[in-house]
Image (spheres, rainbow, N blue to C red):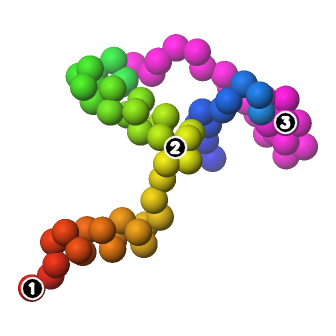
Amino acid sequence: MRLVIDLDEQYKDLFYTLVKTAKATIVEVEEEPEFWMEYPEHVKAGVEKSLEQVRNGQTKSFEEVKKILSERWPSK
């Protein structure tokens, strides 16, 4: 399994300890993947904004989103 984690620097040591305990491998990638370069700037900006919101805990559960959407567009 491969997993990409956007990690705050303050948790790096803890994360490395967990990885070592799990006998996993870490591959650090500093450059942007090739597919990222193909996206328009407004798409990249939206993704970056979303990642920042996640880091700040500004998320909603799936149930909350379903409720919001059902109120906005009630089924007939």
Q: Which residue is mark 1?
A: 76
Q: Nearer the viewer, mark 1 or mark 3?
A: 1
Identify the residue at image location x=33%, y=74%. 67
Q: Which residue is mark 2?
A: 54
Q: Earlier in the sequence, mark 2 or mark 1?
A: 2
Span colored in magenta? 12-34
Query: Dot 1 lies on which element?
Result: loop
Q: Compared with residue 74, is residue 14 higher up or lower down, i.e. above or below?
A: above
Distance from disc 3 to disc 2, alpha carbons, whole Å, reads 20 Å
Q: Earlier in the sequence, mark 3 or mark 2?
A: 3
Identify the residue at image location x=51%, y=43%. 54
Percent position of residue 32, x then y: 47, 18
Do the residues bearing badges 1 and 3 touch, measured as CB atoms within 8 Å? no
Q: Which residue is mark 3?
A: 14
Q: Which mark is residue 19?
A: none
Q: Amino acid at mark 1?
A: Lys
Identify the residue at image location x=16%, y=78%. 74
Quadrant of residue 13 within the rendered picture: top right
Q: Compared with residue 75, is residue 21 higher up or lower down, i.e. above or below?
A: above
Depth check, front residue: 41 or 29: 41
Identify the residue at image location x=41%, y=29%. 48
Packing grade of label 2 (10 A; few <14, some 14-19, many >=20) is few
Of the 4 image quadrants, the one containing the C terminus is: bottom left
Residue 2 lies left or right of residue 58; in this view the side is right
Residue 59 lies left or right of residue 71; in this view the side is right
Packing grade of label 3 (10 A; few <14, some 14-19, many >=20) is few
Residue 11 is at least partly visible in this image: yes
